[in-house]
Image: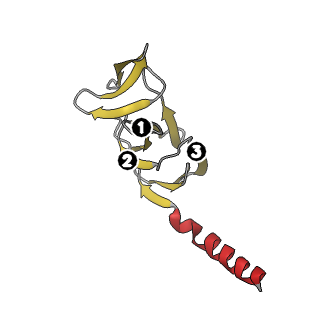
Amino acid sequence: MRFKYLAISLLGVLWTAPVFAESTTFSPTENVEATLVLAGSTLTVAVKSNIQSDSRTIAFKAENELHVQIDDFNFDGAKDFAAWQIDDGMGTYTIHRVFIYQPEAGFFKELTPACGDDFVNLRVERDKRTLLSTYWEMNEPKLCVTHFFPD
């Protein structure tokens, strides 16, 4: 009898687990649909167009909750996305991983900042076509400017 209750409880947990996944769908460019499914510390990215379909899973080393932000991070007119979290330490800054849509490849490529390892406290400056973030040099915070120039 105990096994029956345990089995039913376990099935209930497994049945409701997909409810905890957060899903976002958007169009990076015309005739392309991207779906982001955030579940815990993994993000599944699926891209579908008239020509091809592709899906990949990205793992994050995160203890805090992940969030998704849709924006044009490289100012090319296509929608990109970032996955971000509050730092695992004192929770005083945000850490972003930015993924830009590559129309020729039909998928997203991770963007790295011009300096430092991560986009920390990311700010988007559209008028200057730059991404501003923070990095540390000899324990001193510095401003990192990642520029994008018009084609």
- Under tag 3, what secondary structure? strand
The colour scheme of the drawn protein is secondary structure
Percent across and percent down for residue 117 are 49, 25
Quarter of the figure with the N terminus? bottom right
Q: Is residue 27 above or below residue 141?
A: below
Percent across and percent down for residue 8 are 69, 80
Q: Which residue is mark 3?
A: 58
Give 145 or 151, whichever is nearer the viewer. 145
Q: Which residue is mark 1?
A: 90
Q: Is residue 33 above or below residue 95?
A: below
Q: Which residue is mark 2?
A: 70
Q: Are discs 1 and 2 less than 8 Å apart at CB?
A: no
**Circle 2: residue type:** Ile
Give 69 or 13, whichever is nearer the viewer. 13
Quarter of the figure with the C terminus? top left
| Residue 14 visible to an observer of this rendering | yes
Percent across and percent down for residue 56 are 60, 48
Residue furthest to the bottom: 1
Label 3 and label 1: CA atoms lie apart by 25 Å
* Between marks 1 and 2 in the image, the one whose residue lies nearer the viewer: 1
Q: Earlier in the sequence, mark 1 or mark 2?
A: 2
Label 3 and label 2: CA atoms lie apart by 16 Å
- Under tag 1, what secondary structure? loop
